[in-house]
Image: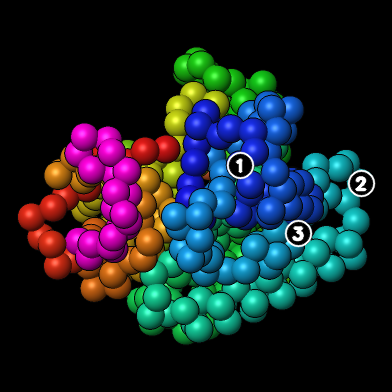
């Protein structure tokens, strides 16, 4: 399989991975042949890239660390919780039932993370754009869990971090949609309103008896920054709870690597550099390090250009050298197809990745 931006998709190409809709259902199944109409439909749904089948890379599998079905179920549970909270009539029994479902999600994801502790972590499920908020909350939860496991936190703490992260942006329900989805620059008043999602979220979660209070603090503090430049209370250093400091890293990473209405998605390697620019000032260095060591920086299936001028596809990652994956070269510097061969960039130290194509 190979990652291809929708712009480069042509009729006749076949999907190598399913695409999911907001309710966790498969929208387009693996093996489906793309047509002009389908490509246009995907564009309308906000899908920017897909995985396609390619005989040169048939053996290359970009398996996510967590099975797609489990992630889809998790995103759907988070969506249901958000939507229930948005209703004026509050049904506590139904809410508690969904929180129990979320705890089951935590248990399953936790098991997967423990089993894959020594491989590099990757989430690459493709969703339609309307799933963004729920997918974001889910992925932030998973990334924060990965960090906590890396740092050797006991299960109970990982559980508190997961539950709080899965619902960290629930306060956004209280912000007018026009402001949340505004493509342009926010006015100072609008920005102030957006910042309140932290307080709204905390107020919602702290009132739920079935929800851990420390997890509710993640909603309140996930935009605070070490140097006091965050919000809503401009807390500094140790005034910020450790859970919120971890979720801040996961939150910004996931936002940067997702496509938004006002900018393209950044690649993991670029997003990580961006985060490191705030190391020690905005984000705590040890959480950045734990995270960077655990995640895939160059996803399998990605097309890259090398400093030699050749083009290649990432086929595997090196746990000990996350910056230097194994690539399969398929085109020489003059743009001519070559018999594909593999190069381990952790051994060929003079060759660099200079560009990524997506
Ligand atoms: Fe937020």
Labels 2 and 3 touching (C-beta < 8 A): no
Q: Mark 2 sits on what residue?
A: 89
Q: Earlier in the sequence, mark 1 or mark 2?
A: 1
The reply to whether the magenta stretch includes residue 343 is yes
What's drawn in magenta, residue-wise? 325-345
Lateral position of residue 149 relative to residue 158, left or right: left
Q: CA distance from mark 2 to mark 3?
A: 19 Å
The residue shown at (28%, 38%) is 336
Q: Mark 3 sits on what residue?
A: 77
Q: Where, by quadrant of the figure, is residue 37 drawn?
A: top right
Secondary structure under tag 1 reads: loop
Secondary structure under tag 2 reads: loop
Q: Main secondary structure of the magenta part?
A: strand
Q: Mark 1 sits on what residue?
A: 13
Q: Position of residue 136 (x, y in %)?
A: 57, 48
The reply to whether the magenta stretch includes residue 295 is no
Q: Earlier in the sequence, mark 2 or mark 3?
A: 3
Label 3 beta carbon less than 8 Å to ligand 1? no
Frontmost residue, 195 versus 261: 261
The residue shown at (37%, 38%) is 357
Which-is-in-front pick, marks 1 and 2?
Answer: 1
Q: Where, by quadrant of the figure, is residue 211 drawn?
A: bottom right
The numbered disc on residue 100 is: none
How packed mark 1 is, by other alpha carbons closer than 10 Å (few <14, some 14-19, many 20 or more), is: some
The residue shown at (52%, 28%) is 7
């Amino acid at each position: 399989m190979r990652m291809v931006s929708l712009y480069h998709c042509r009729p006749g190409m076949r999907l190598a991975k399913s695409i999911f809709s907001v309710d966790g259902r498969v929208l387009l199944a693996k093996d489906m042949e793309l047509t002009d109409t389908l490509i246009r439909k995907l564009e309308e749904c906000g899908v920017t890239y897909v995985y396609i089948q390619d005989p040169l890379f048939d053996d290359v599998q970009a398996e996510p660390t967590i099975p797609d079905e489990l992630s889809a179920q998790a995103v759907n549970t988070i969506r249901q919780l958000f939507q229930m909270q948005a209703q004026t009539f509050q049904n506590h029994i139904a809410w508690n039932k969904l929180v129990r479902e979320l705890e089951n999600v935590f248990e399953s994801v936790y098991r997967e993370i423990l089993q894959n502790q020594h491989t590099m972590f990757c989430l690459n499920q493709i969703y339609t754009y309307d799933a963004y908020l729920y997918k974001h909350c889910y992925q932030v939860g998973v990334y924060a869990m990965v960090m906590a496991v890396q740092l050797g936190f006991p299960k109970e703490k990982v559980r508190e971090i997961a539950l709080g992260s899965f619902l960290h942006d629930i306060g956004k329900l209280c912000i007018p949609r026009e402001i949340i989805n505004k493509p342009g620059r926010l006015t100072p008043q609008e920005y102030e309103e957006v910042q309140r999602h932290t307080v709204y979220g905390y107020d919602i979660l702290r009132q739920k008896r079935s929800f851990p209070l420390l997890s509710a603090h993640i909603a309140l503090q996930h935009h605070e920054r070490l140097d006091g430049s965050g919000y809503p209370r401009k807390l500094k250093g140790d005034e910020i709870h450790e859970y919120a400091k971890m979720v801040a890293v996961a939150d910004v990473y996931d936002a940067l690597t997702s496509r938004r209405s006002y900018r393209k998605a950044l690649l993991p390697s670029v997003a990580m550099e961006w985060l490191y620019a705030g190391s020690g000032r905005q984000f705590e260095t040890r959480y950045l390090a734990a995270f960077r060591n655990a995640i895939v920086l160059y996803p399998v299936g990605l097309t890259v250009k090398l400093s030699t001028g050749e083009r290649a596809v990432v086929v595997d990652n090196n746990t000990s050298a996350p910056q230097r994956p194994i690539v399969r070269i398929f085109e020489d510097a003059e743009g001519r197809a070559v018999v594909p061969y593999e190069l381990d960039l952790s051994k060929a130290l003079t060759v660099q990745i200079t560009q990524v194509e997506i």
